[in-house]
């Protein structure tokens, strides 16, 4: 999946109180407390939405922005992939897709937990039976 640089919108800050309440003021990916801030997952909906936004710490925001992911630091993504919140699950899956060492068993196993399209970076939608 190609990583495009997305500029975050100021309007996403309006979700800050709800995100802080939902996450208890911690990064929703790693549970870190290092400057958690709202992060909106592209492509952006017309208006910022909770199911496309998460609270992310400085390290996780850097990774979401395209920074190099240190695999040894990223094992928390194994847990984040199971999150109930769609934005957290999607962010974790996207990070796992681009991690260096994607052939490692723990990365493969974590990615098998979700149905994400590697080409688009979006969760596949399944028709209801």
Image (cartoon, helix red, strand yellow):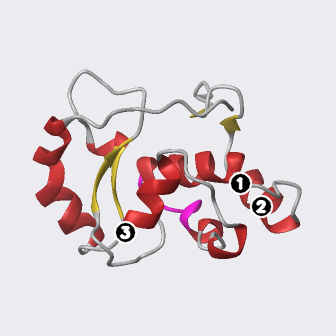
Q: Is residue 18 visible?
A: yes
Magenta span main SS: loop
Residue closer to the observer: 104 or 52:
104
Q: Is residue 82 magenta?
A: yes
Question: Which mark is first along the chain, 1 or 2?
Answer: 1
Q: Is residue 107 magenta?
A: no
Report how far apart the C-alphas of labels 1 and 3 lie in the structure: 19 Å
Q: Kindly identify which residue carries mark 1.
A: 99
In the image, which disc is placed on residue 27? 3
Query: Quarter of the image holding residue 70?
Result: bottom right
Camera-side mark, 1 or 3 = 1
Residue closer to the observer: 36 or 67:
67
Q: Kindly identify which residue carries mark 2.
A: 107
Left or right, 62 with reference to 129: left
Left or right, 110 with reference to 73: right
Numbered range of the magenta stretch: 80-85
User: Residue visible at 12% across and 59% down?
Assistant: 17
Residue closer to the observer: 84 or 3:
3
- Measured from the top left, where is residue 45 in percent x and y? 31, 25
User: Residue visible at 66% across and 73% down?
Assistant: 75
Report how far apart the C-alphas of labels 3 and 2 lie in the structure: 20 Å
């Amino acid at each position: 999946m190609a990583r495009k640089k997305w500029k975050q919108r100021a309007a996403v800050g309006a979700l800050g109180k709800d995100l802080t309440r939902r996450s208890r003021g911690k990064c929703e990916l790693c549970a870190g407390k290092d400057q958690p801030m709202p992060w909106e997952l592209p492509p952006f909906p017309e208006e910022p939405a909770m199911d496309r936004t998460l609270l992310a710490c400085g390290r996780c925001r850097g990774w979401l922005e395209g920074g190099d992911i240190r695999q040894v630091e990223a094992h928390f993504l194994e847990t984040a992939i199971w999150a109930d919140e769609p934005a957290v699950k999607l962010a974790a899956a996207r990070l796992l897709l681009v991690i260096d060492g994607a052939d490692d068993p723990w990365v493969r196993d974590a990615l098998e937990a979700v149905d994400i399209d590697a080409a688009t970076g979006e969760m596949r939608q399944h028709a209801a039976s």
